[in-house]
Amino acid sequence: MCFVTDVDEAKRAQSLCKASRMTKGRNVLGERAIFFSEERRHVPRRGLFFAGACLVCASLMGCSVRSASIVPPGGPAALVGGEESLRPGLTAKGETPTRDNEQRESTPIIVIGFVGGFVARNNAVHSPVQLAARLRDSYPSGVYVEVFENRRREDAHRKILEILGKTRNGGLSDSTRRAARLIIYGMSWGGSETVALARDLKEEKIPVLLTIQVDSVAKLGQNDELIPPNVAEAANFYQTDGLLHGRAEIRAADAKRTRILGNFRHEYKKRSLTCDEYPWYDRLFTKYHTDIECDQEVWNRVETLIRAKLPPIEDKPAK
């Protein structure tokens, strides 16, 4: 096979090939020589030597000659004929790699909730715990749901890494990160920990589908206002009455990457809610903060936002 480095040289070689076939009457080798050319800039002496050698080759062998398309310096090399090469294990452009599909299907959607104050993670009086129970009932498989005390953020972080399947060296593969689907919600101090956990995951390049804060109260040293850019969507529910009230506004650190669904205000001074199951001291000293936690209208909206990110519920077989 012969190579030339100049378009004009390729054309001259082609002319010689035609003349050679006219005299010899046939293609001696029965092969095609493919000539690749580069942009005409500076042709080194070595290139001229090979060009001359190929001219001799063309005239003696009677080879047919065609020039390849010019590839700019630094541009991708293409196969002759315009065909695109696919390496083993890769798919065509626009298709999702099979490995990523398999990883996503095998990894459950993770829903993490945080209760507020000093509430226990299994105290079914409180709305964050009730919401988690309903989600578990709807999704016995494919969705992992767990509630943590707001002081147990590190435990929640470890549980996420465990579910995603960290490698032996403690890290996560790129395919695992791409497959991660997380939703985090929290009430009061739990709202502050929701943002803090999302920020922890940002450092590990793990995306979060959705964060929801309900009457979020920032802990000392935490910023529950600024949503990190690894979060796709975020919502905030709050009230502004009484001694204890939540964050009135959240905003995106990067508005191009995070969509703020809204800062939704609720008022309770003119509404009478029945929260008899909550402790008397909560209803006395933090009445409106307690009202938004036991307000089923608020938590139904929270649940709707979460379920919108989950797969459709399969119909249960009739008994």
Image: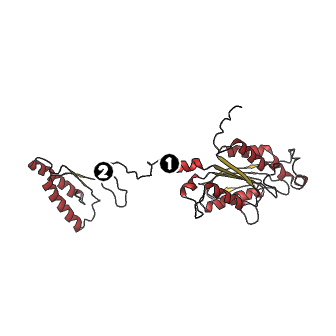
Q: In which quarter of the image is the C terminus?
A: top right
Does 58 appear above or below 305? Answer: below
Q: Which residue lies furthest to the top in this view?
A: 318
Residue 156 sits in quarter: bottom right
Q: Quadrant of the N terminus?
A: bottom left
Q: Residue 98 carries which label?
A: 1
Q: What residue type is labelled 1?
A: Thr
Instruction: Classify residue 185 as left or right of residue 240.
Output: left
> Cβ–Cβ below 8 Å for labels 1 and 2?
no
Q: Residue 35 carries which label?
A: none
Instruction: Classify residue 88 as left or right of residue 184.
Output: left
Number of numbered tags placed on the structure image: 2
Q: Distance between the residues labelled 1 and 2?
A: 28 Å
Q: Residue furthest left?
A: 23
Whether residue 287 is visible here, answered yes or no, is: yes
Q: Whole-percent x and y of residue 108?
A: 63, 49
| Mark 1 / mark 2, whichever is N-terminal | 2
Q: Whole-percent x and y of residue 41?
A: 28, 63
Q: What residue type is labelled 2?
A: Val
Whether residue 226 is visible here, answered yes or no, is: no
Residue under the point 70% across and 49% down: 145
Q: How busy is the neighbourhood of tag 2: few (under 14 within 10 Å), some, or many (20 plus)? A: few
Residue under the point 83% across and 53% down: 289
Looking at this view, is 58 or 228 the one in front? Answer: 58
Q: Whole-percent x and y of residue 282?
A: 87, 54
Q: Is mark 2 on a helix, strand or loop?
A: loop
Instruction: Classify residue 24 as left or right of residue 87.
Output: left
Q: What element carries label 1?
A: helix
The residue labelled by disc 2 is: 80
